[in-house]
Amino acid sequence: MAALDAADSASAQPPTFAVEAAGRLPDYDAVRRAAARLDGVAHRTPVLRSATADARSGVQFFFKCENLQRMGAFKFRGAYNAIAALDDAQRRNGVIAFSSGNHAQAIALAARLLGVSATIVMPSDAPAAKRAATAGYGGEIVEYDRFSEDREALTKRLARERGLTLIPPYDHPDVIAGQGTAALELFEEHGPLDALFVCLGGGGLLAGSVLAAEALAPGCAVYGVEPQAGNDGQQSLRAGRIVTIPVPKTLADGAMTTHLGELTFPIIRRHVRDIVTVSDEQLVDAMRFFAERMKLVVEPTGCLAAAAAFEAAAEWRGRRVGVLLSGGNVDLAAYARLIGGG
Ligand SMILES: *Cc1c(COP(=O)(O)O)cnc(C)c1O
């Protein structure tokens, strides 16, 4: 399953940092427009507190629960915003995405709500539960063989032949703006927090959060959090350019990206305080904490930000710290094994 999801964001070609990307970078106004589009459609997810977490650490934590978002992850926000922004002709023709993870379900559901047809390119050995969820939201699944077919080439050919618009999982202005509405809601409800921890795969959620923070909480220290095994974002921030790594092995299957995006990187770079990493063991500890203390199912990737925030607690004593819980879609057998194992 992990290997399949990794393919979501890995691309065959390392990106070249394009200067013209600057002209396409979304801004805070784009986040506001996304919030207006999502109003009454996406859940305004709750921000939960934990007396236990606060007492343990001396920090005031604010957990933004995107595991309780429609289809179980923040990805619904970006997918819906991107499809809602299409013109009439594009909507009539439909959209296409390649994914076996949360982006596929987000595109399928958002497209159905907007009356647009969605084609999802998935590996033929994708987990049955994920296929069923995507098909259940009305997505038309096109299968490919991971070992012999080039997914990007297939997707591009289908897009061309059928006149479909490709919606990528993170490197798209409307996707980034949509993802930014989660942090926007958090700041609107709880003011300019002292720090905000956000998980990092391709950087759509983190870049969107930066846009919200720059406008509403310029003094808030924003941190990106990656799995230890896949710290391409941290390396990129240090190097000042997008660094590409091999597909990492980690429980955080939503963050198995090999590189940041041409649009997400410049936004992340101009504002993020740092990018930090956590181990798979820390992810499992956080999953147990959320299950036991807060009665929340959070998937491993969804625990990245929390694990880093717990680790950094000593630095933030007496302060107000936001944590984005990005999703809750996890295979139940795997979940039981992980949280039961010790
Ligand atoms: C996609 C995803 C991420 C990573 O988001 P990016 O925008 O690619 O950085 C994190 N958590 C979950 C649950 C996801 O589905």
Image: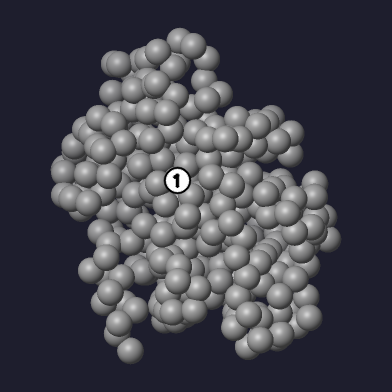
Q: Can residue 20 be seen in this view?
A: no
Q: Can I make out residue 249 in this image?
A: yes
Q: Residue at x 37, y 28 (%)?
A: 112
Q: Residue at x 58, y 56 (%)?
A: 46
Relative depth, front residue between 150 and 92: 92
| Other residues around mark 1 within 10 Å, as few (<14) / some (14–19) / many (≥20) | many
Q: Is residue 43 above or below residue 142?
A: below
Picture quarter with the C terminus: bottom left
What sort of colour scheme is used for the picture?
one colour
* 168 shown above or below 253: above
Q: In which quarter of the image is residue 181?
A: top right
Q: Position of residue 42 (x, y in %)?
A: 53, 40
Left or right: 111, with 340 as reference point: right
Quick check: is the Cβ at mark 1 less than 8 Å away from ligand 1? Answer: no
- Give the residue at the far right of this rendering: 219
Per the image, the residue denoted by label 1 is 70
Q: Where is residue 24 in the image (x, y as percent from the top left)?
A: 65, 31
- Vertically, is 127 above or below 338? above
Q: Which residue is drawn at 45% across and 71% down?
A: 295
Vertical order, 210 against 245 (above or below):
above
User: Which residue, as the protein is rendered here, is positioned at the far top?
Assistant: 89
Q: Where is residue 299 in the image (x, y as percent from the top left)?
A: 40, 64
How many numbered markers are drawn?
1
Tell me which residue sits at (70%, 36%) in the image: 32
Q: In which quarter of the image is the N terminus?
A: bottom left
Front residue of this view, candidates 274 and 326 = 326
The amino acid type of the residue labelled 1 equals: Arg
Give the image location of residue 255, x and y in percent.
44, 59
Most foreground residue, 246 or 199:
199
- Describe the element under mark 1 as helix, strand or loop: helix
